[in-house]
Image: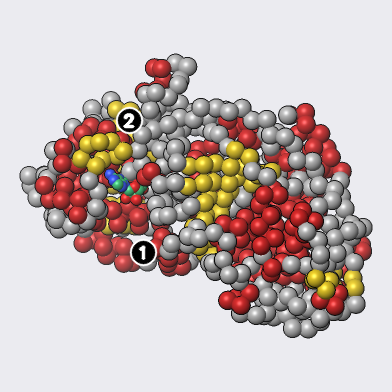
Amino acid sequence: MRRQTEATKRKHQVSSDAPPAKRRNEISSLSAKKASNKETQRAFKGSAHKTFPPKKHLDTIGNERQEEKPCVKTSSLFKNNPEIPELHRTVVKQAREQVFSPEAFQELDLHPHLISTINTVLKMSSMTSVQKQSIPVLLEGRDALVRSQTGSGKTLAYCIPVVQSLQALTSKIQRSDGPYALVLVPTRELALQSFDTVQKLLKPFTWIVPGVLMGGEKRKSEKARLRKGINILISTPGRLVDHIKSTKNIHFNRVRWLVVDEADRILDLGFEKDVTVILNAVNAECQKRQNVLLSATLTEGVTRLADISLHNPVSISVLDKSWDQPNPKEVASIQLDSFAIPESLDQYVVLVPSKLRLVCLAAFILKKCKFEKDQKMIVFFSSCELVEFHYNLFLHTLLCHSGTPASETLPSASWPLKFLRLHGNMKQEERTSVFHEFSHSGTGVLLCTDVASRGLDLPQVTWIVQYSAPSAPAEYIHRIGRTARIGCHGSSLLILAPSEAEYVNSLASHKINVSEIKLEGILAVLAKDDCFKRRQRGAQRSHATGPQEIRERATVLQTVFEDYVHSSQRMVSWAKKALQSFIRAYATYPKELKSIFHVRSLHLGHVAKSFGLRDAPRNLGVSAVRKASFKRPDPRRKTQRKHHLVPAEVLHSEHSSGLEGNGPKGRKQGLRVAPSKPGLRR
Ligand SMILES: Nc1ncnc2c1ncn2[C@@H]1O[C@H](COP(=O)(O)OP(=O)(O)OP(=O)(O)O)[C@@H](O)[C@H]1O
């Protein structure tokens, strides 16, 4: 298949159906100036954009478009695409875990009020497997590394022992004592979510005060809360460091628990500096504590990155004993690089030529969320700019495509679409409100960065779409893990370019199985959607049927996107920025994936089309892109920061996805942390 992929790449590089640059620019600037048309002339043959005399436009994109304009013919979406290779994936046996255990919480030695809170407030009776294994070990006072699949109840696996142990302290906790437990999580939304769980568990134990610190909140009010006292402190690393440096009232001398949730992410190099400061501060004051590290993708290797002073830790992994490992001893080990995926999660992949990516994503959203009932979807993008661009584009094109009110245009068996977005460049208030809105909604499409990939428990999500492949298998697992939680059913779709087909085998090498679905199957939904029916001159209907009709409708959809993007200069430059951001992200795939994802294999003209751009922007020369993929920025040369395609800026964009890390990824080195007091390495 590799040879086939190489051939595909070569073909991909040379093929182009775009018109000569000069002419292309003339056309796009003309259409950009006269943006407010009412009908677009659509044609499906020929390879260049052509202008036609103005026609009355029946399809309105947004409300801004009132005037007539020369129509622009959309270049063929279905010609000169790279061949879609046959997927010859290796079928692997995935690691499995049993979610629930038969045991009830009553069987644990917990305070009766804690048990009744679990039963009545949280409405849970039996433990999950990870809870059954972790809670007794943690109640014994042991350090632990806990790994179990996404959505298997790891939050309660640490929260219950923390609450049980703190309420049982003989000298009753005072609020002013400050933190007894420190919980580190990578994102603000996860901090809020974990705080909510702790708060519920603490209902009967009102003297123990939980609190959350996270970026984006007012520092002053956080300082005031810290001054009054917080006993179970949940924080993102960056914000805690802020307070360690600037708030005198924060002391760690009573800390008994250090919990690091999503530990592989937090102990990763992105958080290097912050974690170092936190561990130094805690180690300097704290006499004896229990450390708990949790994640669905935890390996013992992560602890080597930080001197986290684990004392004889227990490794908890709930992998099925029946899982067919070549070496059965490995089943109990937490060093495996293959992680369990919920059994009720169906994973799919679709190979889509770049030109058709946007139409494919839109058709998939329509298929699931407009024509199927009760669907809730999360779509992952690789940067904040990409989320913003697609959010705005879909909001203006897929919701109110025709000038008539939505209810009149919707086919009878369809449901209204709702789009939300979440990324690190949003104001915290908005982030929190989106998080709550999506959590409580039964339907909707959330477009987001990896800010939503870890730990978030968003109920009833039915589909996860990855519009770009993640850079590590662990991230793939966390993203898809936002669905199929706690035994529920869910599905995921990974969208790859034909040149990226090999990624499926890379996933297989981590025991991840994906089944292929065909692009035609996704586009077929357009046959149902008369919003994208082709109209010819004089409002004649097209009589195409079957595949031809679907192609026509896909082209109409693409034209709707292109018309919107070219409706103003501002939109065009926004699309270009989004395209640039996509290329920057593409340039930062790790070394081991570079043979699959390399900027040189991108056909800029085709990729531009997936941003609704009729032409590849001139200032995004391939040579600049090539440089970006090879050169790391030299921090001493300020001028380099102006260069738009340096990977450092991509890392910034990942940072701004809301994950609070601020160091470059990729270097592997230990964190330099001052050891805890001699003889007290806990
Ligand atoms: N014993 C239980 N019975 C029923 N539901 C439970 C139980 N324990 C946890 N849950 C629910 O399961 C869902 C997932 O739990 P949680 O968020 O803790 O998973 P997780 O393992 O931390 O996932 P991730 O790896 O994605 O962070 C939550 O809605 C939680 O309320």
Q: Which residue is mark 2?
A: 316
**Residue 550 location, quadrant:** bottom right
Q: Which mark is residue 219?
A: 1
Q: Quadrant of the C terminus?
A: top left
Please give the name of the residue rendered at 85% of the width and 48% of the height, measured from the top-left corner.
80
Q: CA distance from mark 1 to mark 2?
A: 37 Å
**Label 1 CA crowd tier, 10 Å (few <14, some 14–19, many 20+):** some
Secondary structure found at label 1? helix
Residue 348 rendering spot, x and y as whole percentages: 58, 42
Q: Is mark 1 within 8 Å of ligand 1?
A: no
Using the image, determine if residue 9 lies above or below residue 393.
Answer: above
- For the residue marked with disc 1, what is the amino acid? Arg
Please give the name of the residue rendered at 69% of the width and 69% of the height, measured from the top-left corner.
531
Q: Is residue 577 visible?
A: no
Towards the viewer: 640 or 110: 110
Q: Is residue 502 visible?
A: yes
Which residue ends up furthest to the bottom in the rendered image? 67
Using the image, determine if residue 348 lies above or below residue 380.
Answer: above
Residue 381 rendering spot, x and y as whole percentages: 59, 53
**Residue 133 location, quadrant:** top left
- For the residue marked with disc 2, what is the amino acid? Ile
